[in-house]
Structures are given as C-alpha cells and as structure tokens.
Image: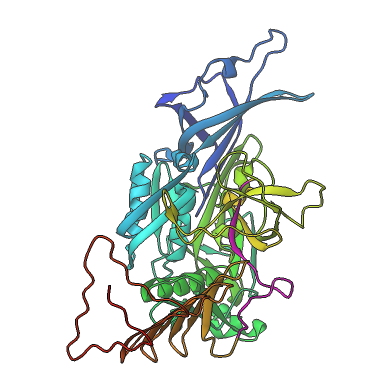
Amino acid sequence: MGVVTVSILQNGKLIKPEFELLSIDVLRECNRIPVAELVYADGKPEKKEFPLSDSNFFQAGKEIEIKLRYEGVTEKEKTVFKGVVLGQALRMSSEACLLQVELSDTAVRMTAARKSTIFEEMKDADVIGKLITTAGLKKGVVDPTKVTHKRLVQYHASDWDFLLCRAEANGLLVASADGTISVKAPDLSAGSKKTFKFGIDEIYHFDIESDTRHQRSAIKSAAYDIKTQKLSDPVSAKAFKLDQSGLNNSMVNKPMGNAEEMLIGGAALNAGEAQAWADATMVKTRLSILKGSMRIPGTADLLVGDVIELEGMSKLFSGKTIITGIRHQVNTTEGWATEIQFGISAERFSNLYPVNETPAAGLLPGVNGLQIGIVEKFEEDPDKEFRVKVRIPSIESKTNAVWARLGSMDAGKEHGAFFFPETGDEVILGFFNDDPRQPVILGSLYSSVNAPTIKPADKNPLKGFNSKKGLKITFDDEKKIMTLLTPGKQSIVIDDDQKTITLTDANKNKILLSKDGVTIDSGKDFILNASKGDVKITAGKKVEISAKQVEVI
C-alpha cells in the first residue's frame, strides 16, 4: 500500500510536525479495554532537553486521537483510536532517546475502584447500561436480556469486572471503542463485512487453529430449588453452530467422547437464569474452537464484532467468523499493517483475571477456609469485647492462641442467647475477610473425645441442651415430651402424649396436672398460708378432708 499519513491530536489540536513519530501500536479486543502506544524520538543530550516530554502534549489525562489514511486515497482519514494518556516513559539506548506514551480508552475509568451496590428489579441489560452511563461513557448497542433480577449484588468489584461477568453470563461480547461500549450477542448469520480470499487478497500472514478440547455434545445447568430442597430439573443449552463445514457440531464433539457438561449452581437460580447460563457457556465453548489471526495491509474499515468470511483456507477453516480483536501497527519500516483476531478463550473471565479482592485485603497473607480451634482456659477479654481465647493447632508456635469473637444464634444489647464455650472445646473458626487476625467462633464440634450426652439414633427423636454440671433440657419428638432436669433430680416434665405436666423436687414433693385434675403430693407438711388475705376453697360437688386429727383454730 501507499504512504501513510498519521494525525495525532490532543483535544482536537495537531501535534507539531517537528516531533518524529517512530511507531504506533493500537489494540482493540472484545472484553478488553482498548489501549495504544506511541513511540517518538525525543531528547537532545547536548542540550539536556526532552522537547516533547517537556511540552505537556502527552500530559496524563489529556485526550489523544489517532487518525490514519493513505496518501493519494480520496477517503478521509479515519480514527483508529481515541482515549486518554495514562503515562509516559523515557528510554535511552546507544542508538536513540525515545518517548513512549501509554494510552487507554476512557472505559478505563470503570476499572478505577472496587464498589459495592445493589440493583433491584432490573435486567442485566439495564444494569449494564447503567454502569456505562454512570461512568460518563456512551452506551452503544446493548442487546436485551430476559431475566429480571429481584436483587443483583455487586460486591467489592470494579464496574468493568462486574459488567463483563454479567455480559458473559448472558453470552454477550463487550466491545469498547472511543468511549462507547456495546454489548452484543455473537451472530454469524449477519452478512460478512469483508471476504478474504486466499491467493487473491493481499495477506501478509495468517495463523489459524482448531481446538476441540472444550467441546461438549450438550451443556445443561441446574441449581438448588428452595421449594423442593433439591436440584432443579436440568435445562439444556441451545445449539450454536459455527459456519465452517469442517467444524460441525457432531465432528467437534467426538474427540472428547461426546461428553456432556452439567453446570451446577449451589445457590438458587430461576429457570431463566439457569437457561442463560447454559446458553452462554455453549456459545463461549463453540467460539473457542476456531482461533487465529491474520495480518493484512492497514485498514480502518473493520471493527471488533464484525463478521468476516475466509475463503480458500481449507474446508476446515473456510467460512464466516467474528472479529474478536483488531491491532493496528504503524512504523517507519513496514508502514501500516492491521492484524485481525478471531476466536475467544473458553475460560471464564473470572478464571483469567482477579475479579475478587485478595484475601485479607492484601494487608497480609489470608487464611483459607475454616480452621479448628481449641478453647483455652478462661481469661477476661482485655478489650472488653467478650471474645474467647482459642488455640489454633495448625499454627506451629508456642504462643498460638488468638482472641476470637463468639457467634451466637441471637446476640444484642441486653438480649440474646448466651452459651460460652468451655475449656478444651473444639470449635469452628472462620475469619472475617479471610484475615487471620480476625477469627470468629461459628460453632462447636463433637468428636470421640468430646462426645454428646444424647446418643444419635436413626429416627433422631432426642434433642436438648446439657450444661457441664448436668442441667438438662431435653426434647423427645417421639414421645412428645419436654423435660427440664437438674442434677438433684428436680424436674419439670411436659408430656403432650399423656397430656400431663409434672413438677417434682428432691424432697419427694410432686404436682401433677392431668386430665383428672391437679394432684399435689407432699413428702412432709402441706401448708397454705395467706398472711394478708383469705383462703377460699370452692368445689362444684363436695370437699373431703381426711386426717388422723383435724384441728380448726
């Protein structure tokens, strides 16, 4: 092709022509923020000056636009990149002094900070649109999604990461260009933007491969159903067919034994979300079969998401494919070349990039999972936070005891359930934010060493509470009896089966409430005393008094 004319503008103003541009590298990819690099000759050692760097033309935050065109072509120059300066670097070798400028699309502001928020009664497409506009960016085409979420939680994640995760969950591809973000489903049925014919069109090189390792004959998804208390009936992904005749679905599934994949959601999902999950996974795996790149003479006519057609590249690879990346490179030796990328990784975005915050916020190495703790001898919490001193066996240290907060089924100011663990109890330790300095007791454990007082049984009829001194509250579901018992054999027994309530003390005194009435048995004296009032005994029939001696005073 001909000579390339390059225009570099800052807020619409052209850079001075005396600054020598050595190279341009612009990269746009689906699901990634576009970036660019400019390299200029800069620096005059004899004058100890760096004219371009000192000019503030590429000051951080300045808006830069890159336009390209061929000399002698009637078409106007076209923008291949528009974004902001992130930084610059000066580099010197024995040959030259260079200024390297790093640029990014303004979508980079969506990565600036982790945020937490809740979206209520919104579809994913609406959430995505809101994230885009809230960042001050332009919303391009955002394909509609079906599921309305009662509540969608963005927890300590950047807007960009959250947007990509939700787009991926719906089988959508994200394309950012010059401050505009579009989120669309891949569609091979669309007409091709351009056809590349091997042996006819000018192609500098190409590198295409097929990879069937991630292919499945069927993808299904199921999630926990709260109402049935089991996994929901699986839903099957819709078929997604590639355009290449040599990559038909039946053929690509064979190498992996026509295996099916079941996606399991441990939490509740509605049927629509489970279906979208399966469909999205199928799309992603199918688009990962055909991957490659092709380098051609520079052109600004193709964009990420466009459909192109390959001809004459064997039956296996010929057909339509979707552009998933565009790279423009301009230098003084090769001129302008454009590299087209197609295909995507089968890996989920969250597996490729650290979308989650590091454990313990990165302040120190975090702790993984739950840990075992052994309660130490009681000491009063020096911080007055009602914590428990606990030894962690997995910490090999002479001073391996920590202060752990105590979880409870109910706790609050002047109310709650109070069950403080005993010395030697084996407890379950969790850690707030995975920070090993912040343990919390989640519960206690039985074992052969610390055995329960109630023996487990098949029907599991007995439940209860036991104190270390033998105070017991027992619930018998089989006999429908609730018992409150002390070590001295004093008890209250509520028997629903016999319809009785029995109160017994250690002195052989007993009160029985039953269908026959109330029976009071006294081991010794029975005294009714109303020192400041009357005693009245009323009977519907008769009153009987039987004794060896009756005295009325």
Q: How is the image coloured?
A: rainbow
Let me know if residue 72 appears in the view.
no
Q: Nearer the viewer, residue 457 or 269?
A: 457
Q: How many marks?
A: 0
Q: Quadrant of residue 205?
A: bottom right
Image: 114 above or below 482: above
Let me know if residue 127 appears in the view.
yes
The answer to whether residue 76 is left or right of residue 87 is left
Q: Nearer the viewer, residue 329 or 461?
A: 461
Magenta highlight range: 438-456
Q: Quadrant of residue 361?
A: top right
Q: Kindly identify the residue that appears in the image at 40 percent across and 41 percent down.
A: 179
User: Going by the picture, which residue comes out furthest to the left?
Assistant: 540
- Across and down, in percent, residue 213 comes to 65, 74
Image: 245 above or below 205: below
Looking at the magenta stretch, what is its main secondary structure?
Answer: loop
- Across and down, in percent, residue 284 comes to 52, 68
Check the picture and name the quadrant holding the C terminus: bottom left
Q: Kindly identify the residue that appears in the image at 47 percent across and 90 percent down.
A: 478
Q: Quadrant of residue 211?
A: bottom right
- Across and down, in percent, residue 145 comes to 34, 65
- Across and down, in percent, residue 169 comes to 45, 64
